Image: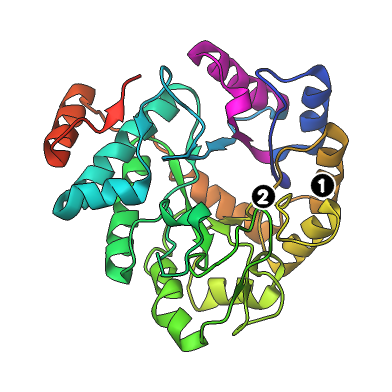
Amino acid sequence: MAHGATILDADGLRLTAAEKDLFREVDPFGFILFARNIDTADQVRALCADFRDAVGRDCLITIDQEGGRVQRLRPPLARDWSAPLEFVEQAGAQAERALYLRYRLIAQELHALGIDSNCAPVGDLVTPQTHPFLRNRCYGSEVATVVRLARAVAQAHLDGGVLPVLKHMPGHGRATADSHKDLPHVEAPLATLQAQDFSVFQQLNDLPLGMTAHLVYEALDDLPATISAKVMQMIRQEIGFDGLIMTDDISMKALAGTDPEKTADSVAAGCDLVLYCNAPLEARRAVAEAAGVMSEAASQRAAAAMAQRQAPKALDTAAADAELCALMGAKVHEGQ
């Protein structure tokens, strides 16, 4: 059975009766959590159960838990981390192992609450023009470094029973504007993009899920990547990413048109799923209707992605914390 081609959210700490009815009707592939959805551990677990009960299956539930300013879970529910780039710079030569331990601990926290996906790693390259909204969320400026560190982050999630979402495909680091508010344009030549930005994602093309970038690559198309069939085809064929691709949140201001129009354009371009957040109930219904059900190809990619969702490997939390502090030479997080 094909599920709805959306990932949706909830207004509050538990689903309302109207939300339950909507989700039962439109059957979104999965859901995403925000800070407004989080209070206590029992409450988060109950909300995750609400989502799964509404659609009648063990669906994907994701979150943004990068660290720094982009983390929905905070103490006492979860550790509080510095921004990824600051963490990498502090770790120095030990960054790969340190990032693995950091995100293995994050994955453990998520899984214990019923959350089985995280919108990380970030594969975007830091450039001199990277906008501040993104810059310290990245892992570095060199292709080989970012690939190595993003791979460690992804493996940490998989080992913790949590599916990673690689973002922002095919590379957001050259954006000089915040795509939450404006549409960035990237003027770099195609050869430069292929050798640098796109190369990161090509070397990570075996990961189960990816997220698009809302920006225009002028060397490829005059449409934003999320709604560009040319860019989506390039991601599939040249980058070789055959995982499940979701849009970045289509309510962001980078995309023009109504939300149902943006939804239809994203699906037509080749996105498997539409991520839609922070909207009234009827707007969520309209987007779900515009998205329709997942294509056969998308459903196959979804099945392959979900097959990588495994039981967590054993983790000695105290030992992982101690090793991480030793690697970093200091305490690196605020406790749960």
Name the spot of residue 102 as percent of width and height, x first: 29, 38
Residue at 55% from the left image edge and 67% from the top image edge: 176
Q: Which of 60/223 is in front?
A: 223
Q: Amino acid at mark 2?
A: Asp
SS at badge 2 = loop
Residue 205: in magenta span: no
Residue at 40% from the left image edge and 24% from the top image edge: 78
Task: Answer yes or no: is residue 141 visible.
Answer: yes
Residue 249, label in figure? 2
**Quadrant the N terminus occupies:** top right
Task: For marks 2 and 1, give the one nearer the viewer.
Answer: 2
Q: Earlier in the sequence, mark 2 or mark 1?
A: 2
> Is the residue under label 1 in contact with that under label 2 (CB below 8 Å)?
no
Residue at 64% from the left image edge and 69% from the top image edge: 225
**Which residue in the protein does label 1 denote?**
287
Q: Is residue 27 above or below residue 193?
A: above
**CA–CA distance between discs 2 and 1?**
12 Å
Q: Is residue 131 above or below residue 91?
A: below
Q: Which of 95/266 is in front?
A: 95
Rendered image quadrant of residue 254:
bottom right
Name the spot of residue 138 as percent of width and height, x first: 40, 56
Considering the whole magenta stretch, tell me its main secondary structure. Answer: helix
Rendered image quadrant of residue 318:
top left
Rendered image quadrant of residue 269:
bottom right
Name the spot of residue 107 as percent of width and height, x first: 38, 34
Q: Amino acid at mark 1?
A: Val
Q: Is residue 125 left or right of residue 267?
A: left
Which residue range is magenta in the image? 29-54
